[in-house]
Image (tube, rainbow, N blue to C red):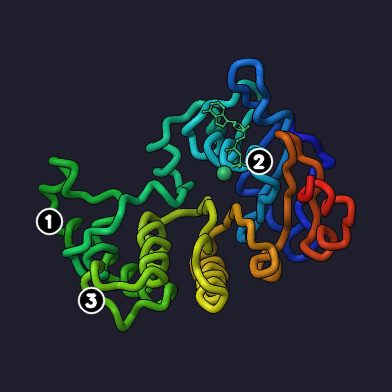
Amino acid sequence: MVSQTLSVGQNPSLKENKPILIVDNVSKRFGSFYALQNIFLTVPEKSIVLLIGPNGSGKTTLINCISGVYKPDGGKILFNEKDITKMQIHDIVRIGLVRSFQVPAPFKKLTVAENLLVCGQNNPGENFLRSLNRRRWRVFERELVERMFKVLRTVGLEDKADTLAGELSGGQLKLLELGRLLMMNPKMMLLDEPIGGVNPVLANKILSHIIDIRNEFGASFMIVEHRLDIVMKYVDYVYVLSKGNLIASGSPTEIVEKKELYDVYLA
Ligand SMILES: Nc1ncnc2c1ncn2[C@@H]1O[C@H](COP(=O)(O)OP(=O)(O)O)[C@@H](O)[C@H]1O
Ligand SMILES: [Mg+2]
């Protein structure tokens, strides 16, 4: 039973969106050590939620539980109204919940366009019986190519379609990674440090492409990121973890105003 008191953000337009993800009383321990303790949180559809907390607070463990890498020791995870707590990673991907490291490194000797195409999901060629149906193949290929062009535009790589991935800059590779995830038709993307190691100009560019993805594809996001000065203005809602516990949540403005959180970060 999910608590009725769960907040889904202060943004009034978001409150009306139903949750795409519900983390309901999730705990995860390693031996006797609790890396996560009774975590409740929700991500409304088409929202961008930020997960923050000092090193070792459980952020990656939570992303691992949601994406199926770890099975929680207690609690439930619901995605798009489906209980995914015990589902296998590839089944979770198939129903539209993807995370950054699930796309392998790009093929350096393939072009940007080709790299996107190989990430297209549910390839009918993988299924012998379906592959006999040529009409289905043609429809699939046309849809895949249309999607590829839409993805190229959304991540700002339209003029790089024919460039080899091996010739891209570090920032362009990050955009390609977002594009390849997007080819998998996700309803939600989990991103662990999407602007890690990039300069502020590029970081802002990547985050504005994330906004475009939300607006044009209707995807939701849970982002783990340390660089709060840059990321805060792009997100709808923030959850704060400390020592495996959820200690605060609120709109970015509310979080910035909670002075007690600064002690947690300095501790
Ligand atoms: N596989 C594991 N085995 C044992 N302890 C782990 C494992 N993964 C994470 N931990 C511990 O759980 C805590 C939370 O880790 P983590 O989720 O990686 O934190 P964060 O991503 O917030 O830095 C840390 O104390 C870490 O040492
Ligand atoms: Mg981590």
Instruction: Specify the farthest residue to the bottom.
Output: 159
Specify few, some or many for label 1: CA neighbours under 10 Å numbering under 14, 14-19, or 20 or more: few
Which element is circle 2 on? strand
Q: Residue at x 40, y 57 (%)?
A: 181
Q: Is residue 48 above or below residue 162?
A: above
Q: Amino acid at mark 1?
A: Arg
Q: Quadrant of residue 162?
A: bottom left
Q: Amino acid at mark 3?
A: Thr
Which residue is the site of mark 2?
Answer: 22
Q: Amino acid at mark 2?
A: Ile
Which residue is the site of mark 3?
Answer: 163
Specify few, some or many for label 3: CA neighbours under 10 Å numbering under 14, 14-19, or 20 or more: some
Q: Residue at x 60, y 16 (%)?
A: 31
| Label pair 3/2, CB-CB below 8 angstroms | no
> Looking at the image, is mark 3 or mark 2 earlier in the sequence?
2
| Label pair 1/2, CB-CB below 8 angstroms | no
> Looking at the image, is mark 1 or mark 2 earlier in the sequence?
2
Q: Residue at x 14, y 51 (%)?
A: 133
Q: Nearer the viewer, residue 144 or 51?
A: 51
Res 188 seen here: no
Image quadrant of ligand 1 equals: top right
> Looking at the image, is mark 1 or mark 3 earlier in the sequence?
1
Q: Nearer the viewer, residue 242 or 92?
A: 242
Q: Which mark is residue 101?
A: none
Q: Nearer the viewer, mark 1 or mark 3?
A: 3
Q: Is mark 1 within 8 Å of ligand 2?
A: no
Q: CA distance from mark 1 to mark 2?
A: 40 Å
Quarter containing the C terminus: top right
Give coordinates of residue 79: x percent, y percent: 57, 41
